[in-house]
Image (tube, rainbow, N blue to C red):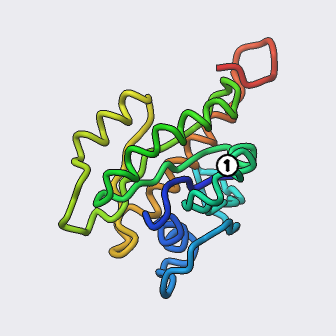
Amino acid sequence: MKLAVIGKGVVGKSSLTYRFINYKLPQGHDPTIEDRYKTTSTINNQLYSIEILDTAGEDDYQNMMDMWINFGEGFLLVFALNDKESFNLLRSKRERILKGKHGQPTPMILVGNKQDLKDRQVKFEEAKQLADLWGIEYIETSAKTNHNCKEAFEKIAAKVSASRVQPKSGGCPCNIF
């Protein structure tokens, strides 16, 4: 299973990924260009090998976005709750993912990170409303406190797993939803 973590720089994409893989935060901040991690996890009572692509958030690397879209089966769209711009930028990233997947079902989850901070710029209701509009799930996380980090990855992995389920009725053995 291949998951891609997408969002603006410094929203905590790497920290969320580290929490899921290693259960500890990276020391210091070194901007990511592209890092890949592998782990195994039980999703829907089945053991999966999960490859996670932690992507760059800086504008200089957005030309790599098409490659990241081709890689991913599921996407965590991450923004920082204390950064309204990071929330607003996800609209165009989501559109680019949908365009790149050519109308194929594309599991996504909206992730509001840095839930532990007090200087919140995006309210829960606003993010939830956007997720509902997009027909995806919304979850708030804190990589600092490890709040919902594992759950965010498990939720998107479960959506990818469910998208792979074959129809039980006869006919074509392909995924058509």
Residue at 45% across, 67% down: 10
- Towards the viewer: 168 or 2: 2
Residue at 33% across, 74% down: 145
Relative to 42, is 1 on the left or the right?
Answer: right
Residue at 43% across, 30% down: 134
- Towards the viewer: 145 or 92: 92
Residue at 19% across, 64% down: 119
Three-letter amino acid code of the residue under disc 1: Met
In the image, residue 138 lies at what x, y percent?
37, 44
Single out the residue that lies furthest toward the left.
118
Numbered label tally: 1
Relative to 13, is 137 on the left or the right?
Answer: left
Look at the image and tell me whether residue 1 can be seen.
no
Quickly name the residue at label 1. Answer: 65
Single out the residue that lies furthest toward the top.
171
Q: Quadrant of the C terminus?
A: top right
- Towards the viewer: 60 or 74: 60
Secondary element type, mark 1: helix
Which of the 4 quarters of the picture holds residue 176?
Answer: top right
Which of the 4 quarters of the picture holds residue 169?
Answer: top right
Q: Is residue 116 above or below residue 108?
A: below
Q: Is residue 83 above or below residue 94?
A: below
Look at the image and tell me whether residue 33 can be seen.
yes
In the image, residue 12 lies at what x, y percent?
45, 67
